[in-house]
């Protein structure tokens, strides 16, 4: 993140604390014991922030995580003309977005390149203003991540979309119209983009083979609170009666199930016991029984989940990533870091993204025994990982390497902290409160 961008990020998100040129030093081998507050979900808050563009009335979001992606999107919304106000909410940090007037001018390439979720602006701006211009979005370096489903769906709703020289230009001169759309695969982003567009489009939209991730349910519930008519929420067929004028809303962002799963694995790896507050284990979908089979005990209590290692220890399991409620691809790398020291072998198959094994080389530097054959990583558990200097290559790989470092013998130095900051609110500080020894150091 360059200096100029940091200045504009701070303008939109005064809480943002850039950490240029720093790395994390994790002293491994301490059991995590204590209470860890699970933050609002990154993957829920981003579409929720975009939903505020659909109405001139204020939308208040509570439990907003203090992460880089939120700072970037805040800046993008501000550049589009929205007013942003930060305050202390009931559950955490609250953000009020008031998009009374919007100028759908071309959005800053540098900011969009940092975050794939910026593609959601397309559906919302088209629906609200009838036009949108956006550089092709960036995000994690984890594969092709096309946006063809988004574009095909918007075209079916009457939009004219051109992609030229790395720029998407979309117009809907006569407004968007409801349509029946069948997604070729249940894409999270495409479902959200089309949902955002459909609530203002004239008539009925049906999205078939929709993704069912809980973050989509969060978005649909907030839109309903704003006055949208959506049925089938939580299923793979969403039916939207569009065209209603939307009001504001006051909505609390759901807890981050990926942070929950990651820290639960960390508690098990370090043989500690952590109360993960504000979350419940059901959010994990089929990752819950998979973790149980691997020896991660999860006990739902009144205000959260207690995570610990089973007395029998950790055992290898086979995992295939799948759309929700299947095993989340975002938990694949943390699970691999945990299984690297489980007894026996694990086969981890990635079916969602084609380049999501970039953490494997880093885990190998720490002594993990992992072989990748096609889309499957074969993990043979070793007794213990050893601290090493490693590099985060995407947001989930960053968390996986923190986890690996917590369980390892000696010091792990983690570079590429922008990736951790993109998705996790104060993860290092919250781990330190549970007994981890983690410091920030200058790179050099
Ligand atoms: C979202 C999540 C990300 C998670 C992923 C899968 C956010 C901000 N990010 O990403 O953390 O890992 O879901 O659970 O919520 N695809 C196409 N064409 C399209 C759209 C998708 O080919 O137009 C493909 C992608 O390349 C990928 C698969 O579909 O192989 C799933 O992608 P998708 O569900 O859209 O992921 P994102 O919404 O980008």
Image: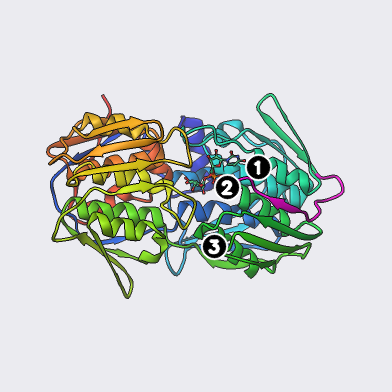
Front residue of this view, candidates 341 and 349: 349
**Quadrant of the rendering where the N terminus is positioned:** top left
Count up the numbered dots: 3
Q: Are marks 2 and 1 in contact (CB under 8 Å)?
A: yes
Percent across and percent down for residue 331 are 37, 48
Residue 34 in sight: no
Residue 389 at x, y percent in the picture = 23, 29
Q: Residues within 10 Å of mark 3 (few under 14, many from 20)?
A: many
Across and down, in percent, residue 51 comes to: 63, 56
Ligand 1 within 8 Å of disc 1? The answer is yes
**Chain-order first, disc 1 or disc 3:** 1
CA gap, disc 2 and disc 1: 8 Å
Foreground label between 1 and 3: 1
Q: Residue at x 32, y 56 (%)?
A: 290
Asked whether residue 152 is in view, the answer is yes
Q: Quadrant of ligand 1?
A: top right
Residue at 64 percent of width and 62 percent of height: 58
The residue where tag 1 is placed is 149
Residue closer to the observer: 371 or 284: 371
Q: Which residue is mark 3?
A: 218
Q: Is residue 382 above or below residue 324?
A: above
Location of residue 14 with respect to 392 vertically, above or below: below
Q: Which residues are magenta?
A: 172-185
| Farthest right residue in view | 174
**Residue with the mark numbered 2:** 187
Helix or strand or loop: what does disc 1 sit on? helix
């Amino acid at each position: 993140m360059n200096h100029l961008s940091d200045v504009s990020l701070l303008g939109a998100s005064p809480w943002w604390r850039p950490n240029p040129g720093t790395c994390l030093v994790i002293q491994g081998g301490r059991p995590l014991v204590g209470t860890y507050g699970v933050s609002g979900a990154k993957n829920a808050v981003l579409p929720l922030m975009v939903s505020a563009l659909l109405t001139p009335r204020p939308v208040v979001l509570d439990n907003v995580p203090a992460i880089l992606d939120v700072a970037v999107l805040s800046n993008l919304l501000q550049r589009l003309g929205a007013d942003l106000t930060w305050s202390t909410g009931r559950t955490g940090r609250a953000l009020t977005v008031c998009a009374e007037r919007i100028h759908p001018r071309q959005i800053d390439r540098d900011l969009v390149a940092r975050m794939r979720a910026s593609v959601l602006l397309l559906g919302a701006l088209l629906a609200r203003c009838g036009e949108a211009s956006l550089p092709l979005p960036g995000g994690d370096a984890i594969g092709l991540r096309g946006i063809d489903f988004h574009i095909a769906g918007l075209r079916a709703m009457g939009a004219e979309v051109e992609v030229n020289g790395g720029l998407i230009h979309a117009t809907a001169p006569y407004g968007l119209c409801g349509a029946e759309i069948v997604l070729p695969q249940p894409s999270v982003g495409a479902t959200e983009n089309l949902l955002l567009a459909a609530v203002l489009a004239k008539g009925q939209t049906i999205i078939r083979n929709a993704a069912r991730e809980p973050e989509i349910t969060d978005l649909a519930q907030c839109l309903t609170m704003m006055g949208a008519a959506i049925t089938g929420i939580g299923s793979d067929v969403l039916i939207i009666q569009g065209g209603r004028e939307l009001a504001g809303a006051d909505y609390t962002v759901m807890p981050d199930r990926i942070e929950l799963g990651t820290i639960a694995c960390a508690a098990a790896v370090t043989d500690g016991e952590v109360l993960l507050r504000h979350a419940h284990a059901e959010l994990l979908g089929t990752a819950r029984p998979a973790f149980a089979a691997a020896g991660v005990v999860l006990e739902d209590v009144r205000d959260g989940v207690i995570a610990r290692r089973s007395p029998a220890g950790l055992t290898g399991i086979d995992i295939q990533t799948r759309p929700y409620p299947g095993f989340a691809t975002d938990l694949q790398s943390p699970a691999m870091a945990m299984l690297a020291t489980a007894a026996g072998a694990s086969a981890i198959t990635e079916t969602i993204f084609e380049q999501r094994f970039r953490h494997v080389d880093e885990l190998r530097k720490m002594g993990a025994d992992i072989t990748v054959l096609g889309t499957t990583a074969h993990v043979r558990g070793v007794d213990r990982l050893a601290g090493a200097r490693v590099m985060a290559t995407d947001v989930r790989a960053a968390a996986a390497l923190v986890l690996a470092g917590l369980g390892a013998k000696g010091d792990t130095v983690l570079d590429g902290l922008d990736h951790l900051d993109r998705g996790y609110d104060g993860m290092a500080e919250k781990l330190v409160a549970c007994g981890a020894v983690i410091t920030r150091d200058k790179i050099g």
